[in-house]
Image (cartoon, coloured by chain):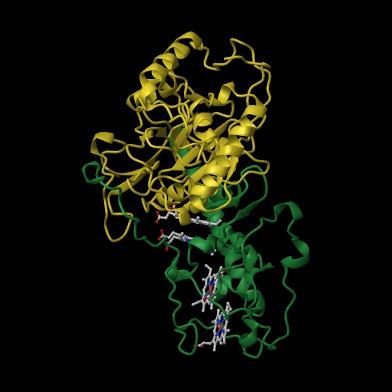
Amino acid sequence: MTRGKAVGPYGEERMPNDRDRDGHAFRMSRRKMLKGVAAVLGAMALPAKDAPASVWETFFQKNFREMSPEELKAVVARLEKEYGAKYGKQVRVGVNPPLEGVRFAYGLDLSRCIGCRRCVYACVGENNQSRNPQIQWIRVLQLNKERGVDLEDAEPYYNPARVPEPGHFYMPVQCQQCENPPCVKVCPVQATWKERDGITVVDYNWCIGCRYCMAACPYGARHFNWKKPGLPPAEMNPETHYLGNRPRPVGVVEKCTFCIQRVRNTPGRYTACVEICPVGARKFGNLLDPDSEIRYIIENKRVFILKEDLNTRPRFFYFYAT
Amino acid sequence: MQRERLRYLRLAAAVIACLAAGAAWAQAPARTKDQSAVGALPPARGDKLFPEPAARQYPVPSPPFTPGIFPCSECHKGMKPNTKRRVLTEEHTNIVLNHAQGERWCLDCHDTYDRDRLHLVNGQRIRFEESYRLCGQCHGDKYRDWKVGVHGKRTGMWNGEKQYLLCVNCHNPHDPRFKPLKPMPPPVRPGDIR
């Protein structure tokens, strides 16, 4: 495969060995080898000779990070056309790059959350998760006040007439956007990585569905499309991002991206879960901005991170406002 | 020894603070007692003395009134204000005070003469769009967190224009405890996913 200019998808200059920001060598040869093996093994599954051009193009599509801006533009145009036909509406596939000087972080006030699950469904709607089979990026745990944050004792299936239930508190869990993400390290094909603004993303066209990342994630934050996602066209959100909420094929892994399609704009909207929360327990902002609510929380409130001992260094901070 | 003294000092400080607050609180209604001319608005003390600096304005949604009830002056401008504590029988019978109710009366918050506005302890009249300032007098810690977007909620742009929900969007001022909600459905158990 010939590569013309050393320019990444966002138009930034790309050094041959500077592709993996975590300091791990980008095992190009191994990846190429794997792809070769996959191509051979998959020979039987190759598109038919008379298949439309777009099927071939999809088959040979590059990893997001290897595409030049021109290549990416062509791919985006093709995807928009495909999705548009499939869902019967005009779909936008954004490729907005990380904003300069931004490192996203999230705060969740455990002294406010009442476990109403409004966030779960706002997220499903915004991010085009499969309705059937069900995929939900946010899981709300009911915990006992007496036992504190004891995940052995967590109940996700609570369903009383009203929440909160006496004696309990609630802890929503989603991708913790780790600074040191174990999921990224185990991916054999570099289909998932951490962007400069701190969002860990997945290239659904590159993911081979091995699910190593799911095994590596200590938070259960990654979800697999065992079947073709069931997304009713009427409910499909047409404002998407390549690395976020665009429709997923069967056999790939997906996860929370801090609503990458919303937040990577100037100005950028708050995430869907922040927007919907009726008690205002969810906070979001730029860790590098000293005036942001997230900095106020870290500097003034009791803050903790989940499974600190694993050294994953989450950018998702649980706190108690009172 | 040292500790004892500190304790006394602290106690004294607390007592003084309480007295001062109480005096201010009692002062507001007392000030207007003798003014009985209906419709004639006595000058509200704060309007000129304490103008709200422009930087302190927080963009908020319109107050969540019951449709049709505002402006209150539609009814009240022709009525003689009744400062007596009593059970209301003709109007507003749905309002039950459950907010430090023993010590509280409507006109602690609502202005006696300008029913379209609220008033602070210092007598300053404020619009309903600024009701957070009223709440902030007694709930300073929550007010401080609210201003930076930590208590309550801001919507809009994380790096641009934001809107603040008013305290009364979440708390009924007359009965402020947050009301429990019906939860959305729980997730499907793994075994049940088809």
- Which residue is farthest right? B48
**Quadrant of the image containing the N terminus of chain B:** top left
> Along the line of sight, which residue is nearer the eye, B114 or A78?
A78
> Along the line of sight, which residue is nearer the eye, A49 or A259?
A49
Q: Which residue does the image show at 49% across and 82% down from the upper left?
A: B92
> Along the line of sight, which residue is nearer the eye, A218 or A245?
A245
Q: Quarter of the image holding residue A322?
A: top left
> Along the line of sight, which residue is nearer the eye, B6 or A232?
A232
Tell whether B40 sits left or right of A103.
Answer: right
Chain A hue? yellow
Is residue A46 shown to the viewer in this render?
yes
Rendered position, A28 above or below A215: above
Tell whether B163 sits left or right of B187.
Answer: right
Q: Which residue does the image show at 53% across and 27% down from the upper left?
A: A61
Tell whether A255 sits left or right of B55.
Answer: left
- Which residue is farthest left? B191
Chain B hue? green
Residue A180 image position (x, y, % from top left): 46, 21
Q: Quarter of the image holding residue A38?
A: top left
Residue A29 image position (x, y, % from top left): 48, 8
Rendered position, A98 above or below A283: above
Tell whether B73 sits left or right of A218.
Answer: right
Is residue A293 shown to the viewer in this render?
no
Residue A86 image position (x, y, % from top left): 49, 48
The total number of labels drawn is 0
Q: Quarter of the image holding residue B83?
A: bottom right
Residue B171 image position (x, y, % from top left): 48, 63
Q: Which residue does the image show at 47% across and 42% down from the upper left?
A: A247
**Quadrant of the image containing the C terminus of chain B:** top left
